[in-house]
Image (cartoon, rainbow, N blue to C red):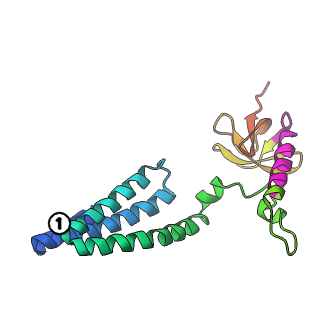
Amino acid sequence: MIVIALLQGAAAAAPREEVYLFVALGLLALSLVLLVLELFVPTGGALAIMTGVAAVASVASMFIYDAVYGAVYLALLCAGSPVVLLLVFKVWSHTPIARRMILQQGADGANLGDVTHTEGADPSVAARGKVAAAVSARLTGLVGRSGVAVTTLRPIGFVRVEGQRLDAIAESGYITEGAAVDVIEVFEGQLKVREQRMQ
């Protein structure tokens, strides 16, 4: 709304052909804001599509303003977009949302990226695969065991099974802290648990 109000104010003050310059710059700013929002708000790609539409409309507005300016503007956007995307994803990879989406810890809490490193050697894909398989096998061995919810699961949290604090997801969507749980399966690298019913 603020961007629209600023564009309307600029349009009223500027000659008619310069309106397209302000529209182009305003749409570029809008596309950057939408891009940042896409990283922090899970919309299933809706904001990413709106970002692309705003960027294309920005280029079109600049071409309407002036063909030479439009060509230069398009070249600058094409050259700068990869750099901007790399910076945005680098920042995003350090956010809590990214950490939740990317499996970084094994069942014992060790960082999988560190497990495969040896002094003076690069981690290999095969070594990472072996670690992931070992973690999966270890978790599968806990199916059918009982434990306790260390945190409230809404539906994700931590449980303690056989003395190990592990990531878990609640089957029912919510389990209170301290509740007794049964491990029913391994789901996407974490335990799926069901609250024990009182008999």
Tell which of 55 and 178 is nearer to you: 55
Is 191 placed above or below 105 here?
A: above
Residue in the image at 63% along x and 44% along y: 154
Q: Is residue 173 visible?
A: yes
Residue in the image at 13% along x and 75% along y: 14
Across and down, in percent, residue 4 comes to 24, 63
The quadrant of the image that shows the C terminus is: top right
- Taking the image as shown, residue 136 lies to the left or right of residue 187, namely right
Across and down, in percent, residue 91 comes to 56, 69
**Where is mark 1, residue-wise?**
8
Is 187 placed above or below 110 here?
A: above
Residue range (magenta) = 128-147
Residue in the image at 45% along x and 60% along y: 37
- Taking the image as shown, residue 63 lies to the left or right of residue 185, namely left
Q: Is residue 6 visible?
A: no
- Taking the image as shown, residue 4 lies to the left or right of residue 51, namely left
The amino acid pointed to by label 1 is Gln
Magenta-span inclusion, residue 148 = no
